[in-house]
Amino acid sequence: MDQHMPQARHILQSTFGYDDFRHHQADIIEAIIDGQDVLTLMPTGGGKSICYQIPALVRSGTAIVISPLIALMQDQVDALQQLGIKSAFLNSTLHASEQREIEEAFIHGAYDLIYMAPERLLNSYTLNLIDRCEISLFAIDEAHCVAQWGHDFRKEYQQLSMLHERYPNVPRIALTATADERTRIEIIEQLALQQAHLFINSFDRPNIHYAINDLGNGREELLKFIKENHPDDAGIVYCLSRKNVETTAEWLNKKGRTALPYHAGLHQDIRQEHQQRFLREDGLIIVATIAFGMGIDKPDVRFVAHMNLPKNIESYYQETGRAGRDGLPSNAWMNYGLKDVINLRLFTQNSDADELFKRMMLQKTDAMLGLCELTSCRRQAVLAYFGETLEKPCGNCDNCINPPETWDATIATQKILSCIYRTKERFGAQYIIDIMLGKDDERIKANNHDQLSTFGIGQEHSSPEWRGIFRQLVAHGYLATDVEGYGVLKLTPKAWPLLKRSESPQTVMLRKLSKASKVKKKRSSSSSNAAVRRFAQDLSTHDQELFEQLRQLRSTLAKDQNVPPYVIFPDKTLVEMVIAKPGSESQMLEISGIGEVKFSRYGEAFLNEIMNR
């Protein structure tokens, strides 16, 4: 063992309040302390930050943490200062006098860690400042931002290879929670990490229950999901457009839940206010575009809901991973429809990207659609996408709990394909459905499509059922959308053998469409109190009351300190207090998440609350 690892373990226990390292943390920390470069992939909530924070405390000098998240730097620094770690940030939110003060302290080695965005780091003024300081390490957080194929691409990240050239003796650690094999290769190439140690932890988040449905009427289904599972919990609802963000937030407020909108079109002050309220208040829902969420450390987000399909599995995994960072049961819920499938394909086909990029994006879209239409374990599919094998079905996704039925949709598919062919591939799904249902429609009559042999041949299914079949046929590659963006459906090469009824007959097996009345409901135990009870092995009523009192005390202390409540102690630590009921400092320090500095600040207050019960 490295001579510095006993010191690292002491810091883990005394400062962070944890008994032992998790995953590959010990190996990563040892490599960085020894001056070696590292690339690590670790799921959200897996403890990435400790991998550079502890080496920053062991090695001589100041660690520079490079992050794209200017809006969250204050919270990150607040959390470190609560642990007694000397830290600061340099970004555009500072006044000139504050910046000069921090820079002067930086030069004199006053900080263990200092945060800055890549744009700040790369300017000549900052580099000249760094040249005058002793640097212990560079931590490149959210390293997937370097990947031009990725969903969070930042061009400045691609210039960070200069750190290796300018500071060859300073170790670097690149960290991300989301990267498939292609993205890993790009991170290594762009950041010149060819000699780095690679640590890949499991991508599995077993506490998250995955559910994807096609029930239509998304808002009503969302409200039903929230009422049944998370009546008082914090959560994130993702919408595709800014307009939908605002209308959905307004609608949820009318239904009795406090919901705040967040998107890039809002003024920065409003975005910052809504983000801070979400972090500091209990039970709030944030309704957002994908502009929200990266770097959010709030551990008690109990659900993430998607009102539209994400563009790829990386996005889906990263966004759903913002639920349940504390390890307690949480939900990832999605509602989607035919329009989402068509729009996803059109978005890629109509982009200005080159053909190679479009082809890659379409492959990623196909993988996302495949996950939605899957009839087997969703977790196995997500992990397989990232190159990881889960030997057995997870038992904690909708397909495992309520296995979907399939049906032979060959004849229904042939009817659809025939109708599209006979209308010369010039119309969208609803028009084709109206023909198949034999609808009395002036447009159909004007086109003489009421004279087609396919007119009225589809009355065995309702219009919503036919839309579900269309959606699956697009997802499975039998139908494609027009590149002009009008939603016109075209036959693909895969469709022609079915249409021509070739000598080698194909069978098309599709999922039976979801019907709310027929879905076997598994009452989720993922609301905050239920999650806590499960984690605490069924707290008694008396202990539940104590837990709520400790939460109230935490809330009061957090307001006094102007920090999010979880920065004081997360729910998980409060539950352990309730179970252990410590009566002394030594007993309190045995609880996970309570280090010496935290005890010196808050220990007596919590001890008194527990002992007065």
Image (spheres, rainbow, N blue to C red):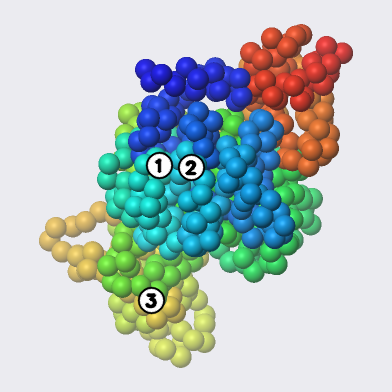
**For numbered disc 3, what is the local secondary structure?**
loop
What residue is shown at x 54% (from left), y 18% (from top)? 10
What residue is shown at x 35% (from left), y 49% (from top)? 164
Earlier-in-chain disc, 1 versus 3: 1
Q: Which of marks 1 and 3 is in front?
A: 1
Q: Do the residues labelled 1 and 2 touch (CB within 8 Å)?
A: yes
Q: What amino acid type is highlighted by mark number 1?
A: Val
Q: What amino acid type is highlighted by mark number 2?
A: Ile
Task: State the CA–CA distance, disc 1 to disc 2.
Answer: 7 Å
Q: Do the residues labelled 2 and 3 touch (CB within 8 Å)?
A: no
Residue 52 visible from this viewpoint: yes
Residue density around tag 2, few if under 14, some if 14–19, many if 20 or more, within 10 Å: many
Task: Check the picture and name the quadrant holding the C terminus.
Answer: top right
Residue position marked by numbered label 3 in the rendering:
352
Task: State the CA–CA distance, disc 2 to disc 3.
Answer: 42 Å
Task: Check the picture and name the quadrant holding the N terminus.
Answer: top left
The numbered mark at residue 135 is 2
* Residue 251 image-quadrant placement: bottom right
Earlier-in-chain disc, 2 versus 3: 2
